[in-house]
Amino acid sequence: MFTYTNDERFQVLHTEGTDEWTLQIKYVQKRDHGAYECQVATGKGTLSHYFNLIVVVPTASIVGAEEYHIGQGSTIKLVCIIENVSTIVFYYISFYSLHY
């Protein structure tokens, strides 16, 4: 078995006694998107299977203006739109986490 990368995030896993091989990519990044090939050498040649990995990057935006001016003691409501997210959303103010 050969793996052609020097990136330690990529690892090929195999369970002894099975025909199943797994490509594991740790800490997937946008640059990991693209075509991948699984190749098996047989007595009759080489078998290849190609697949395309699409990395979806989460985005966050606040609805409205980029800057607000409000008076002390006033109330403001900010609406945050999160897209393409598959994890928990955290809110921060001045780099401090808001826990609810």
Image (tube, rainbow, N blue to C red):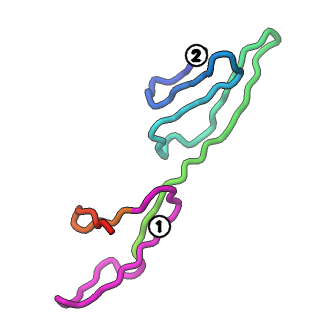
Label 1's element?
strand
Q: Quadrant of residue 21?
A: top right
Which of the 4 image quadrants contains residue 75? bottom left
Q: Which residue is mark 2?
A: 2
* Residue 50 spot, x, y in % from top left: 70, 33
Reply yes or no: does residue 77 show up in magenta: yes
Mark number displayed over residue 36: none
Secondary structure under the numbered disc 2 in the rendered image: loop
* Residue sitting farthest toward the front: 100
Under mark 2, the amino acid is Phe
Circle 2 Cα neighbour tier, 10 Å, few/some/many (<14 / 14–19 / ≥20): few
Residue 67, image x and y in percent?
29, 79
CA–CA distance in space, label 2 to label 1: 40 Å
The C terminus, quarter of image = bottom left
**Is 46 left or right of 89, judged from the image as shown?**
right
The residue under the point 23% across, 88% down is 70
Tell me: residue 21, above or below residue 42: below
Q: Residue at x 63, y 33 (%)?
A: 36
- Eye-nearest disc, 2 or 1: 1
Q: Which residue is mark 1?
A: 82
Residue 82 on image: x %, y %: 47, 67
Residue 73: quadrant of the picture: bottom left
Region in magenta: 63-89
